Image: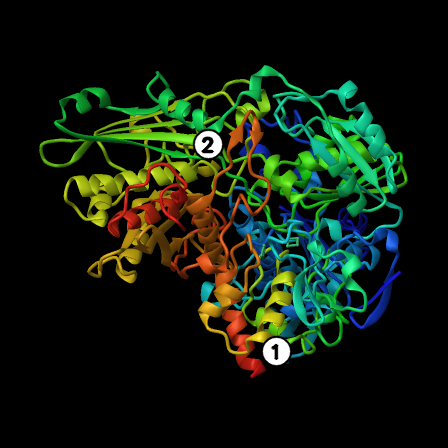
Amino acid sequence: MIKNLSRRRFLQLTGISTTGLVLGASGLAYWRHRKNSFIPLPAELPESAQTFNLFVHIETDDTVHIVVHRSEMGQGIRTGFAQVVAEELQADWQHIVVVQADGASSYGSQSTDSSRSMRDNYQRLREMGASARHMLEHAAAKYWGISPDLCQAQNHQVVRQDNLATLRFGELALTAATLSPPSLPELTFKNKDQFKYIGKKIPSVDLNDIVLGQAKYSADLQFPNTLYACIQRSPVLGDEVDHAGSAESIADVNGLSGVRKVHPIGIPTSKSQFKPLAGIAVVADSTWQALKAKRALNIQWKNKEEHSKFNSDDYIQELKNNLNKSGKILRQKGDTQAALNRSNNKHSAAYTLPYLAQAPMEPMAVVVLYDKKNINVWAGVQDPQNTKWQLHLHLGHDYDDIHVHVPLLGGSFGRKASPDFVLEAAEIAMHFPGNTLQLQWSREDDIQHSYYHSASAVQLEAGFNDNREINAWHAKSCFPSIAATFSGKEEYPASWEMELGLVNTPFVIEHETVECFSAVAHTRSGLMRSVSNIQHAFAVGSFVDELAIASGRDNVAMWLAMIGRDRYIDYSDHGYELGNYSESLTDFPFDNRRLKHVLHWVAEHSSYKATASSGSGCGLSCHYSFLTYVGIAVKVRLEQNQLKVDEVHCAIDCGTVVNPDRVIAQSEGAIVMALSAVLMGNISFKDGQVEQSNFHDYPVLRMHQTPKIRVHIVNSDTKPTGAGEPVMPVVAASLTNAIVAAGGERIRDLPVNKIYRV
Amino acid sequence: MIKFTVNQKTVEADDDIADMPLLWFLRENQNLKGTKFGCGIGQCGACTVHMNGNAIRSCSVPLATLANADITTIEGLASKVGADATTSYQVGSSKQTETLHPVQQAWVEGDVPQCGYCQPGQIMAAAAFLKQNPAPSDQDISEGITNICRCGSYVRIRQAIKNAAKNMS
Ligand code: FES
Ligand code: FES
């Protein structure tokens, strides 16, 4: 439902005072995505959350403000949302100004994760635009004293159909503001062939600011009376500062010029949640002084046995061993064990991945202003609402006096969904009322204190029957669940983590078992672009290729045989209710034809079918995640021990596309990020501490390693689905399959640079 | 006192901050926030500026070494220093394009940036690179441009550099 918003409310939410028309829409389901959340959330939905979620505002000077309530981190959501509203509004793009929403429950979910901003909002945004247009047309009808049927909005004005007189949107804004918004059945929408903005390449609204160096990220905001902070955090999870042992060093650093204060911060616990890690904060007159002072600190730590012996190489072996214990069965059909026992042609393989760090280009930075009543925070976070709530829990400060503003994020990839750094900054800022406190993380802080993508082990086993068909499939996965970071206990992978690619395989197999195994967590883990799809798609895509080779079949033929006849995939016949990324199977059916299509496309358009020359090869894989279907073909060359990735071809079917250029950019970026991880991504722990510290020992892809990339978007009229993440998990298997095709080794333990130079 | 110019304006830095890297001086003393901090050890190039026309990584260059140097930052690259660029972070889309440097222009035409954080550094690196090598091959670009873009905009950067080279020749 759409309501006419009071101008005062609009001012409260956006800081923009207005005289024109303001609309809000209500009823966007919010907490449903999180109903099984392990993150502490408000016990009840705040009443205001039912009211409004996003807003259109038309100013008398023709300016249209479009409020975007999801965070911009390079995916182009500020532009995409505006395109959809402007389309149905019949607005002129020149007059669009995008306003970034603060954290407020009124907006509905602001959680910018799971590649769902457009999926969650596409229809609502169209309704917002169409309602505003309807009201402008009715305002014009009223002014001219004619039937609204004769008034049609186009290009930022309403045209009178009988004599072609016109009124600009700005001229109509005040009258429109006095009308009540239309009900849903009164709204009309454009057809696809009338679209001017949706489906078109529209440049990012932040493009010029970015190339001029004017785009503002958190640390770029300039306030008076700013103090600058850095933190030395416990290198081992749960460790605490040995205050007696550190006193001398702390006193020395306190005496350095420019240093205002050195004091303890955080809580030593394994149940870290979003709480600051235990450490020592240095507050100084400039970031440079704070960084220098931090470097001068020599903190002694009190070890707790729990994590101080943690060694990730051994741990990955342990995860693999765990797969032979008894696990928790999530989905089962038939009698897999009996079928495997009967089969005289069965195969099994285990795959592992190390820890990975998101390493967004902008290290975490936060600005906090505490004025003894209000806490104002400027922080590039993926979810300003959760940030606000966590600040409230951590500081015990009145929820309504906490304000979270969201500048641009210099990348995130899941890292800034965890607001630990904001809690740190606010904890320090409470000691400096009246001053602005800016916290800067160094790259070393980022690499060593991430919410990592967990190390993992996956084992797959399949048995052929006498007709060379696979009739038994046993999938097992072991990794420390993200839930363990919140409970502090050993946990099984959560069902939502398992539904990222292992429970929801697209196969028709007579006997199937999907099982997960618990693991103790020794570090914080969290979201990284496509989350556990990374290990699951790597294992499944590799194993299908191994089965193809073992049975003398082509990779595509093997996939098709396993995917089976055309159908909507649904596991309810054996009692499994698929979470389906929180969407119903009616609205978003899991359609195996779309998966086959993307696989065919990359097989046809890459050099997959060309005769292989020695030392080069092409590998394929496909995967369904975030309701999107992706096929990838990778072409590599292997010379002596040197691997070169030459080409990556990608077909993505993500339903209706609002901005194809941004979908292509996201796909290119996800391919590059995946190559970083597959070729050389490795965060390792020794004695509980991360061994890497910066880009020299946690390398990411650079220009010279970047292949030619081609992205094909499948034309589709279905509802929009995810674009930011689903390309990421498909690259690993395509690449390692290509290495085998080029005559190289089958790599089951990533990264590739353990075996080949990259 | 260390004297040098930043975007053609003379600036002075006290000797007691002689060990401060140029990056922090630009950001916190000069309020030029376009130059970014990405790694602090010369690895990523987010902090790239020009010193006497050459690309340098300002996080690793202390003020002490800058006496009489001419520094250009991203804010000084366009001929009109982003006159119409918006100052509020809330509102996107600076309207001015006509005075952009050809590299910036190519960046706009290719819609290169994703998050944008590395891009001032990429643009400064590319502008200096093209002065040395006005008609680079793919291979030259791979070897000459070593800045990190974690968003993975490399294919577009590569193309934009080639387009800029064409427009500048
Ligand atoms: S911040 Fe200077 S090179 Fe990374
Ligand atoms: S655009 Fe985000 S790091 Fe390059």
Q: Is residue B154 left or right of residue A403?
A: left
Instruction: Give the class, few, some or many, for how many residues have Cα within 10 Å of label 2's Cα (few <14, many ≥20).
Output: many
Residue sitting nearer the eye, A365 or A199: A365
Whether B73 is drawn above or below A654: the answer is: below
Whether B33 is drawn above or below A580: the answer is: below
Q: Nearer the viewer, mark 1 or mark 2?
A: 2
Give the residue furthest to the left.
A466
Visible residue check, residue A133: no
Whether A342 is drawn above or below A464: the answer is: above
How far across and how far down the image is residue A126, in percent? 56, 55
Q: Which residue is mark 2?
A: A455
For label 2, the SS is loop
* Display coloring: rainbow
Under mark 2, the amino acid is Ala
Q: Which mark is residue A118?
A: none
Q: Which residue is mark 1?
A: A162
Q: Is mark 2 within 8 Å of ligand 2?
A: no
Q: Is residue A244 left or right of residue A121?
A: right
For label 1, the SS is loop
